[in-house]
Image (cartoon, helix red, strand yellow):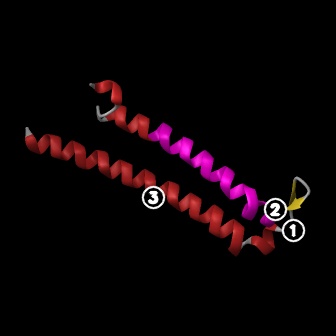
C-alpha cells in the first residue's frame, strides 16, 4: 500500500515539475527573448503605437507573466483534483 501511494505522489510531483518547467520556459522566452534578444527584430512591428520590442520589454512580458500565473493555478487545480490532493478532498 505504501509503494502505491509513493508512486502516485511521484507522478503528482512529476506533473507539477513538468508544468513549472513549461511555464518558466515560456516566461523566459517572452521576457528575455522578446524583451532583449529579439528586440531589434520585433521593433519593426508596432503595437499600440510603440515598437513591439519596446512594448514587450515594458508591458508585454508582465501581461504574459500574469496570464501564466492564472494558467498555472488552473492547471495545478486540475492536477490536484486528478490525484485527490485538492482542498475539497478533505
Residue 9 is left or right of residue 14, and the answer is left
Residue 82 at x, y = what percent?
34, 33
In the depicted structure, whether residue 41 falls above or below residue 31: below
Q: Quadrant of the N terminus?
A: top left
Q: Earlier in the sequence, mark 2 or mark 1?
A: 1
Residue 34 is left or right of residue 81, and the answer is right
Q: Are marks 2 and 1 in contact (CB under 8 Å)?
A: yes
How many C-alpha atoms fall within 10 Å of the one at disc 3: few (<14), some, or many (≥20)? Answer: few
Residue placed under numbered mark 2 in the picture: 52
Q: Which residues are magenta?
A: 52-75
Element type where label 3 sits in the image: helix
Residue 83 at x, y = what percent?
29, 35
Identify the residue at image location x=57%, y=58%.
26
* Gap in angstroms between the C-alphas marked 2 and 1: 7 Å
In the depicted structure, whether residue 35 falls above or below residue 81: below
**Would you say residue 66 sits in the magenta stretch?**
yes
Identify the residue at image location x=72%, y=56%.
60
The label number, if any, that marks residue 44 in the structure image: 1
Residue placed under numbered mark 3 in the picture: 21
Amino acid at each position: 500500500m505504501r509503494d502505491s501511494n509513493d508512486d502516485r505522489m511521484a507522478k503528482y510531483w512529476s506533473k507539477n515539475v513538468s508544468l513549472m518547467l513549461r511555464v518558466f520556459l515560456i516566461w523566459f522566452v517572452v521576457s528575455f527573448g522578446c524583451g532583449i534578444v529579439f528586440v531589434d527584430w520585433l521593433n519593426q512591428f508596432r503595437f499600440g503605437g510603440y515598437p513591439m520590442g519596446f512594448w514587450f520589454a515594458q508591458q508585454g512580458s508582465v501581461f504574459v507573466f500574469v496570464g501564466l500565473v492564472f494558467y498555472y493555478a488552473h492547471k495545478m487545480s486540475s492536477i490536484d483534483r486528478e490525484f485527490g490532493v485538492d482542498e475539497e478532498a478533505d
